[in-house]
Image: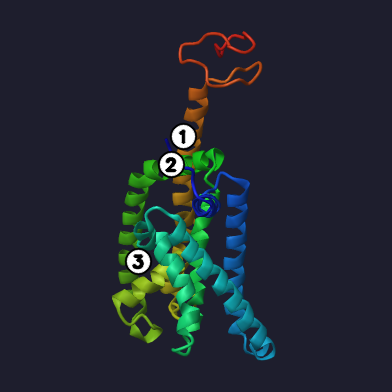
Amino acid sequence: MRKPKSQLNLLRQRIHIIIYGTNTVAGRLFDLILLGLILLSVFLVMLETVKGFDAKYHQILIVLEWIITGFFTLEYLLRIATTNRPRKYIFSFFGIIDLLAILPMYLSLFFFGSKVFSTIRALRLLRLFKILNHPKFTGQSLHLLNALKASRGKITVFLYFVLISTIIIGSIMYVVEGEENGFTSIPMSIYWTIVTLTTVGYGDISPGTPLGQFIASLVMILGYGIIAVPTGIVTAEFTRAAKKIDADKNPCKNCGTEDHLENAKFCHHCGHSLEHK
């Protein structure tokens, strides 16, 4: 005969469900509040670096940060106290991130300037993926992941082509422009090529000869194609995967019902023919 659970164990179980669970209203609400506090905490740290704002509201910022740190500390301790394997949580990825999120404020009592590392709390936003643990979101994530995997070979070949192109163009620009125009070495010329291909254009180095400017114009035009190609590859694979999934579902043209048997000839809902003419 089982012993009835004590009030302490029942409370521990309820807290565990709220903190670790995502399938309950309370669990999702807790996660949303937690994410809101993480964003607020990072925002407060950023505001503290604005000298004018910090000079006026310094005390308020410190009080708010300590309140948030206190909440995170309580949450961290509750996670340890309510799990059956506290050691596993403490040394897990999220466990380490949770600890790093509360340490900066306490360290600031002994080491000046360490509080700025409170921005590491932004890493806790990774918990958002736990909240989005829904079949709809999970399915879309898998589709995107499969598209990236299918595109891996094409993108690798493309990146290899880009790498070779940057080396060749950088070498040509070094010969054409020379040190007097800022192209002091081939690595520096390759740096200029990458900046130009990606359409960033810092402007710290620029060609001064007509031939160099002509080559630069071609590199700029090539840059737009380089940006578009990987996107097109992944999009094509994503579309192909989506069409395959739709075909596998074998939807009825009359009522839209899906998931028929592979050899089914009629819809199991409305009886309409599944043969697509």
Task: Report the residue marked by disc 3.
Answer: 169
Task: Report the residue marked by disc 2.
Answer: 147
Q: Distance between the residues labelled 1 and 2?
A: 7 Å
Marks 1 and 2: CB-CB under 8 Å? yes
Quick one: label 1 or label 2, which is nearer the N terminus?
A: 2
Q: Distance between the residues labelled 2 and 3?
A: 32 Å
Marks 2 and 3: CB-CB under 8 Å? no
User: Badge 1 local density, few (<14 within 10 Å), some, or many (20+)?
Assistant: some
Question: Which residue type does callout 2 highlight?
Answer: Ala
Give left or right: position of 189 versus 4. Answer: left
Q: Quadrant of residue 35?
A: bottom right
Question: Which residue type does callout 1 highlight?
Answer: Ala
Specify the label residue 241 is tagged with.
Answer: 1
Q: Position of residue 228 (x, y in %)?
A: 49, 52
Identify the residue shown where x is 56% and y is 14%: 276
Looking at the image, which is closer to me, 18 or 92?
18
Label 2 sits on a secondary structure element that is helix
Looking at the image, which is closer to me, 23 or 14?
14
